Image (spheres, rainbow, N blue to C red):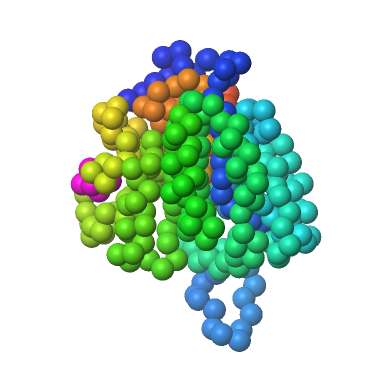
Amino acid sequence: MSHTAGTGAWGSGRGPGAPRIVVIGNANVDVLMGDVAPWPVPGSEVVIDRYEWRVGGAAGNTGLALAAMGVREGVDSDVIAHVGEDFLGGWLEDAMSGAARLTRVPHPTALTVGLTHPDGQRTFVSYLGHLVTLPEDRITAALDAARPGDLLLLCGYFLLPELRAKAPSLLRSARQRGMLTMIDTGWPDEGWTPAVRAEVAALLPHVSAFLPNREEAVGVTGGHEDAVVEAAAAALLELGAERVVMKCGAAGALLVGVDGRVVHPAPSVCVQDTVGAGDTFNAGLLAGLARGMSWAEALAPAVNASALAIGSQPRRYPSWAEVVEAAGETVAAV
Ligand SMILES: Nc1ncnc2c1ncn2[C@@H]1O[C@H](COP(=O)(O)OP(=O)(O)OP(=O)(O)O)[C@@H](O)[C@H]1O
Ligand SMILES: [Mg+2]
């Protein structure tokens, strides 16, 4: 177990030569509605008490969380995502201004409707719309401009067919440029079939860090649901990942790999809504690394940022100062 507040890494700002962050992924509109119980009968109408309309998608959430932590889009980061040429696309552009520069493509904007249930479960219905394409020119330009030590995160992988096709070559060329490469695949629509597992396994030798949650780690390695996370993490390293940063919900996060093994607990939080917890975690990790933290040290802003985000209602992403303050509270509570 490791607590890093007070190491000095928290205080160091972004120097002139600080690594740049490149995020490639999906942004869409999320509409969360609930609670719904019991499951609607086809042909009926259900009236709910509350809804929240907000930015969604892995790159959408990560971009907003990075911006809230003071990472300046266009200066410190390049959040590469696109939107459709319609009203929702325009809304997303406004909502993400300062957090991402979204490219407009001639497709309807992707929309996810999430139904919340009283037991905390959720059902998502997604229309993928503009996600069938990728802003390739911007990706090429961002990788061409990258310097050694810059950080690349691929996210929303399974929702972006073109990213699936191009991820191996993108990761390879990013590594050749000396970038630190990360991928968060999310959950595959088709399940962890042997083909999907082989597809993800083939990416692992090209990543500085694989960023799954517990269930995904077990899914890739073909284990059973009750498989021990440590075994899944070891199997992912065996497949070629340099390190694995595994998100373990309320239990925090596990780092294994070239820098050893670190378990970082999550702060206790009154959870309002866990959507985007993993994306906010990734943003905290990136922000910490960009400030010169080690991978082990950067687990602290990762778990703190995600806890603060999922404890907010309506959703608000924390500033770097709030993330640092939360670390102080965690240490004090132990
Ligand atoms: N109940 C909780 N209490 C405190 N922290 C939490 C809780 N749930 C999630 N987190 C934090 O958020 C991080 C990511 O959550 P989780 O492990 O659920 O990832 P995920 O399933 O990838 O999330 P997402 O559904 O957003 O993709 C965790 O590692 C932890 O730091
Ligand atoms: Mg996730």
Along the line of sight, which residue is nearer the eye, 15 or 195?
195
Instruction: Please identify the quadrant where the N terminus is shown.
Output: top left
Q: Is residue 180 magenta?
A: no
Q: Is residue 172 visible?
A: yes
Q: What residue lies at 61% left-to-right and 54% top-to-bottom? A: 134
Q: Is residue 88 visible?
A: no
Along the line of sight, which residue is nearer the eye, 325 or 208?
208
Would you say 153 lies left or right of 296 here? right
Q: What residue lies at 44% left-to-right and 35% top-to-bottom? A: 175
The region drawn magenta spans 230-236
Q: Is residue 106 above or below residue 232?
A: below
Instruction: Please identify the quadrant where the C terminus is shown.
Output: top left
Along the line of sight, which residue is nearer the eye, 328 or 217?
217
Q: What residue lies at 49% left-to-right and 26% top-to-bottom? A: 148
Residue 176 point in image, percent of width and height: 44, 34
Residue 129 point in image, percent of width and height: 64, 65
Would you say 122 lies left or right of 104 here? left
